[in-house]
Image (cartoon, grey):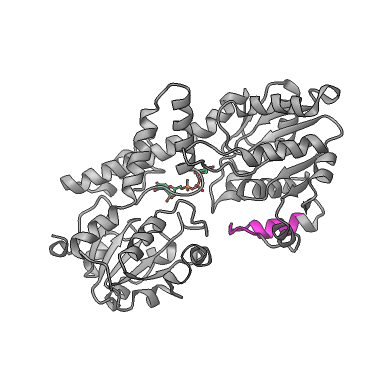
Amino acid sequence: MKIAVAGTGYVGLVTGTCLAKIGHTVFCVDKEASKIAQLRRGESPIYEPGLEAEIVEAKDAGRLHFTTDYAVAYRQAEVIMIGVATPENTDGSANLQALYQVCEQIATSITSPTLVVVKSTVPIGTNDRLAAYFDQLLGDSRKSWVEVASNPEFLSQGTALRDTLQAERIVIGTESQEAADILTEIYTPFDQPILKMNRRSAEMVKYASNDFLALKISFVNDIANLCEAVGADIDEVTSGMGADSRIGSRFLAPGIGYGGSCFPKDTKALHWLAEEAGYTLKTIRAAIDVNEKQRFKLMQAARKDIPLFAGKKIAVLGATFKPGTDDLREAPSIPNLQMLLNEGADVHVYDPVGLPNLENVFGSRLHYGESVASVLQGADACFIFTEWAVFKEMDLALFHTMREPRVYDGRNCFSVKAAEQAGLQYYSIGRARVGGAVFA
Ligand code: UDX
């Protein structure tokens, strides 16, 4: 099938590449000429393991094309998928400007009936409103030319290809059998369970899934904080909880809170949407509140030992919102780095892939290290914000190159026992402190 994909961000690019891989002819459209030029050279503008190789393979096979010329791409497509960003407005609602702009471009481009599939995460009811908007844009002569379907994605950064090629489910929200049939035909080669429902339910599945996972993380962080207060160990607690298959052991890792392009935005968007509808989502409100506070757990612990950060050398390991990505969106590291800088600390950061993006945010205010060892040397304290494998596997003796081996670990990279054996002063989330006197 001939498919155009609007937007070459995570959703659009991964979707387009995977659809081309399974045999469709795909035209990826983006307004940014530099991004399209890069993609035409076979380079991925985002860091995603395995993606670049798949782009090159599908491109060389003649099934994946990149263009800024939306009119040509939309005109020849049987189906147009939209994967543009729906960022957060200042009040927490979703900003749909890019989505509406693409719809306007589609309306001016198409010359025959077309199925428009919205993959972007959008508030419940948006697809219905888009359908009405298309009718208005297309006028009487082309009325009902566009059928709108909702088809949310569930990919995670770092595992986006696997999440798409081996998805646990494909959700299709349509208002006509014809639209459902076309989408079924597109996805049949993936051999994954296809769940068919109406558009509003499909939109809700996406928010409810992300918000449930965010809630699960905030819940475990809440319990971890209580573990610290009452002398329980969160690792032992989650191993006991996770053994119950109704709870499951995934998304039970405590830490300094969830970040990224989805959970923070989607929790706020659903909460906002519920308020607009006259209903307060108390569970989601709680998940948001716990997460906001959780981000500053390490600083709170460190302040007890280091009342003043001014002039202190602070080593920071990890900046991205999770390992396996160079994405810094809503990363808990950002407000913490900001605070350390505001207080006059001399901050040295190492991250395996996130440093170029970090430099775009902080410029010369931070020191960017070339290795774990280089940032630890002579530091007064070390903060860990991301659990990259290179940190989890490091030789803990390296911490003894610091002025004092004081480690504040926001992702529980080491076992308490290993930290004890290595002679560290170690604070982690929801577990016993090591080198207690220092933290008294
Ligand atoms: C998420 C969803 O998982 C995905 O299905 C959706 O399509 C987009 O949003 P992503 O943002 O890429 O994906 O990352 P994810 O792996 O879910 O992690 C999000 C945040 O939660 C990270 O900051 C991570 O560190 C944190 N997290 C995750 C925890 O703190 N504890 C956990 O147990 C799991």
Quadrant of the rendering where the N terminus is positioned: top right
Res 417 quadrant in image: bottom left
Q: Nearer the viewer, residue 365 or 29?
A: 365
Residue 287 place in picture, x, y as percent? 36, 37
Question: In the figure, is residue 17 to the left or right of 335?
Answer: right
Q: Nearer the viewer, residue 157 or 89?
A: 89
The reply to whether residue 381 is visible in this rendering is yes
Relative vertical location of residue 66 with respect to residue 264 in this rendering, above or below: below
Res 34 quadrant in image: bottom right
Number of labels in the image equals 0
Question: In the figure, is residue 63 to the left or right of 351?
Answer: right
Q: Residue at x 42, y 63 (%)?
A: 318
The reply to whether residue 246 is visible in this rendering is no
Q: Residue at x 71, y 56 (%)?
A: 55
Residue 165 place in picture, x, y as percent? 63, 45
Quadrant of the rendering where the C terminus is positioned: bottom left
Magenta span contains residue 47: yes
Q: Residue at x 37, y 34 (%)?
A: 285
Q: Nearer the viewer, residue 256 or 292?
A: 292
Residue 345 place in picture, x, y as percent? 31, 69
Q: Residue at x 71, y 44 (%)?
A: 6
Relative vertical location of residue 170 with respect to residue 363 in this rendering, above or below: above
| Residue bounds of the magenta highlight | 45-58
Q: Nearer the viewer, residue 157 or 73?
A: 73
Residue 439 place in picture, x, y as percent? 17, 61
Magenta span contains residue 431: no
